[in-house]
Image (tube, grey):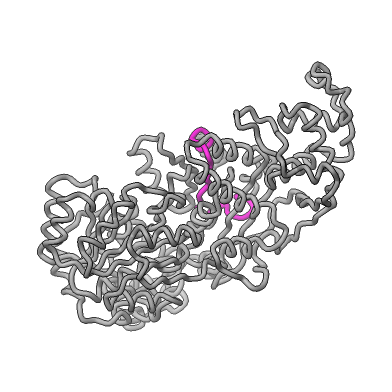
Amino acid sequence: MYPDQDFEQLSAERPTTSGRSPEQVLHEVFGYESFRPLQGEIIHEVASGGDALVLMPTGGGKSLCYQVPALVRSGTAIVISPLIALMQDQVAALRELGVRAAFLNSTMDFEQARATEYALSTGELDLLYCAPERLIQPRTLELLHDASISLFAIDEAHCVSQWGHDFRSDYLQLAVLANEFPSIPRVALTATADERTRKEIAERLSLTEARHFISGFDRPNIQYRIAPKTNANKQLLEFIKAEHEEHCGIVYCLSRNKVDATAKMLAQKGYTALPYHAGLPANDRAHHQERFLREDGVIIVATIAFGMGIDKPDVRFVAHLDLPKSLEAYYQETGRAGRDGNPSTAWMVYGLQDVIKLRQMLEASQGNDHFKRIERQKLDAMLGLCEVTKCRRQVLLNYFGDELETPCGNCDTCLNPPETWDGTVAVQKALSCVFRTGQRFGVTYLIDVLRGSENERVKQSGHHQVSTYGIGTELSVNEWKSVFRQLVANGYLRADPEGYGALQLTEQCRPLLKGEHKVELRKDPEVKKSVGRASGGRTGSAVKDQVTDHVGWEALRACRKELADKQGVPPYVIFHDTTLFDMLERKPQTLDDLAGVSGVGAAKLEKYGEIFLAAIAQLDQA
């Protein structure tokens, strides 16, 4: 799947990089002129031997925060990464830059592993990626003690927290690094952690004395949109057709069955849609992920088993057909869109059944009371984002301790501000109906009673004679669903913990029943086919939407694809779209000209410079 790790060739290609400044490495190796905000501070801290805890949004350039110091300091940097696909991807990308990188994981046979261990012991590697479960083995620790180590980087550090959404028990044992290698700097990095999780990461990894770098969580290029769920499949199709017809994206579902059904539905409609979940054979999962990384326009339909560390820059949308369990999960999953900084969409539909299902799952879990209380708070925060009437981005950022002073102008509540209405009377009717029918029925039945349905079930139960029968004809079925959804979301009603879907009153609803509180409800917006293409970001539209020379663009993409296929890597590992676009705009004629294009470092200039100059020259002759 990825090229063999040829250490002898890599060692011959480039001498050790120790002695260069971070700025030199950034320009000469990675082809960039300057660091992003906070990157420079982090890199200089780690390069000078300091420890660091780094929180930086997905697409913010976390990898450079340890890759650059690794190429400045003497020795080999050890990168702890939770996923095989992620470490293979990063190694492939680094090797394209001429960096001596390798990985140790379970995909390797004995001889490959021994060759990699030998390369480490003889100083032939700049970076070595390793899974946490392998790192903590006595044999690996002994190997590291005998090698020259420049730093330890713990990626996806939120996995160490029991409150993190991707908890991995192997991460708990990484505290051994502070004890076994006290003089070697350590940097822990994550894109997603609230204050509680940050504190736990620092404590578990012995980084309480380290400098903490917290970058802004805002991803201005992502447009956040959440709509009531009416017909999820129809809504998803309309969204993709209107805005992302040829784009690649990720669709998240809660269950494996729903993943399979949704992927099949999209495929039948002509899209390249592939399922991904833990129930598929490992070979199928790997093949589907490989196609997603290498091909254009592929849609992955997945459970949360997919996505951590996915480095594909041009994911234009992330859709949720089910409600995530927390804002951490939502932020992490939506953050897989638009890593290239270009406009992307985080789109979600959710309904009452989502709320009921997650609350029932939470109450039925094996966690203790403290755990359940924390999880309830997280779910309440997620529901708060869904039902909010002000700027969604402000609410999302505030949860992570970040502030946005003014509304973003790039979320659905900014673009189409929702209306509110006085729902006091409707709420009293809904709560009374729950009580009068014995707190034993679900929302569909309750709405039948409120609207005076004459179906047999209502008559047989005798509820056509209760005082709330037929008192709710002023609202439609969907409007009543909205009322009940908001009552459950805000804790006035709860789902039957036995799992039968019946709604029950909570103590919190007592003042509402007595008429002591006025209730403002959110009015669900009228269903529209599209809010419009996502706006924002540094370029205002996706790269290919800016292209005017389509023939030239496709020629450069074809050149990149041919090289990628020969190297056995995804096309973006050769050059990102933004780099190709810059080439097309500048039309460089010499290697010096090409070196000025963003993303063209020394190694890629030497490898591919003449090839792309020839391709560009042919454009002028066409």
Residue at figure coordinates x 33%, y 77% from the top left? 45
| Residue placed most toward the observer, 197 or 561 | 197
| Residue placed most toward the observer, 48 or 268 | 48
Depicted 307 relative to depicted 181: above or below: above
Is residue 620 in sight in this rendering?
Answer: no
| Residue placed most toward the observer, 391 or 35 | 391
Residue 246 falls inside the magenta stretch: yes
| Residue placed most toward the observer, 372 or 314 | 372
x, y percentage for residue 276? 44, 41
Residue at figure coordinates x 14%, y 61% from the top left? 145
x, y percentage for residue 164? 45, 52
Quadrant in the picture for residue 188 = bottom left
x, y percentage for residue 84? 31, 50
Residue 68 falls inside the magenta stretch: no
Residue at figure coordinates x 52%, y 66% from the top left? 217
Residue at figure coordinates x 32%, y 83% from the top left? 592
For the C terminus, the image quarter is: bottom left
Write down the region rendered in magenta: 240-259
